[in-house]
Amino acid sequence: MDSDGYVLVAGTFLILVSVASVGAVGYIFATARRRVREMKTRDYNWYKQQYPAAFKDGRPTCYSCGGKSVVVKNLMQRTFMREHLCVDCGTTLFYSSEASR
Ligand SMILES: [Zn+2]
């Protein structure tokens, strides 16, 4: 292969890589946006409506295993969301916004 051939191959490769990375970044952003939207829907009030039986003495417990220990985990900083999940089985119960506190 002469040097023009290499340039052509390298150029094609670079174009493919750029197209792929733009696609991947777009996909990641779209997924993150969808996740944030989903998290904002699944908040404390949603959980209360969805699983009224999971509330004991006004405190949320796990709808899946009945566990009473709920931990709060900070999610990706850019989403500003917190995840509330069950210690016993790891099920995500609901989300809250960091800004709302
Ligand atoms: Zn559980």
Image (spheres, rainbow, N blue to C red):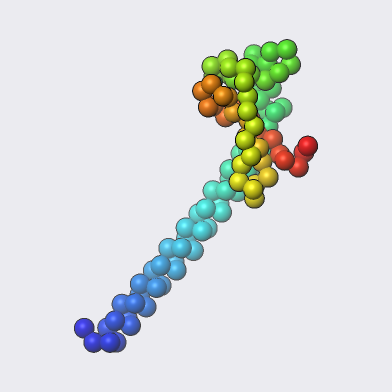
Residue nearer the viewer, 91 or 35? 91
Report the side of 67 relative to 18 (left or right). right
Please say if 97 is above or below 87.
below
* Residue 91 quadrant: top right
Residue 79 placed where, x, y %?
65, 47
Report the side of 101 relative to 70 (left or right). right
* Residue 10 quadrant: bottom left
Q: Who's the residue at 44% across and 66% down the image?
A: 19
Residue nearer the viewer, 70 or 79? 70
Q: Who's the residue at 47% across and 60% down the image?
A: 23
* Residue 68 quadrant: top right
Q: Is residue 49 visible?
A: no
Q: Is residue 78 visible?
A: yes
Residue 40 placed where, x, y %?
67, 38
Q: Who's the residue at 66% across and 41% down the image?
A: 81
Please say if 77 is above or below 18.
above
Q: Quadrant of the N terminus?
A: bottom left
In this figure, what is the number of numbered marks?
A: 0
Report the side of 11 relative to 99 (left or right). left
| Residue farthest bottom in this picture | 3
Please say if 62 is above or below 73.
above
Q: Quadrant of the C terminus?
A: top right
Q: Who's the residue at 32% across and 81% down the image?
A: 8
Residue 20 placed where, x, y %?
43, 63
| Residue farthest left in this picture | 1
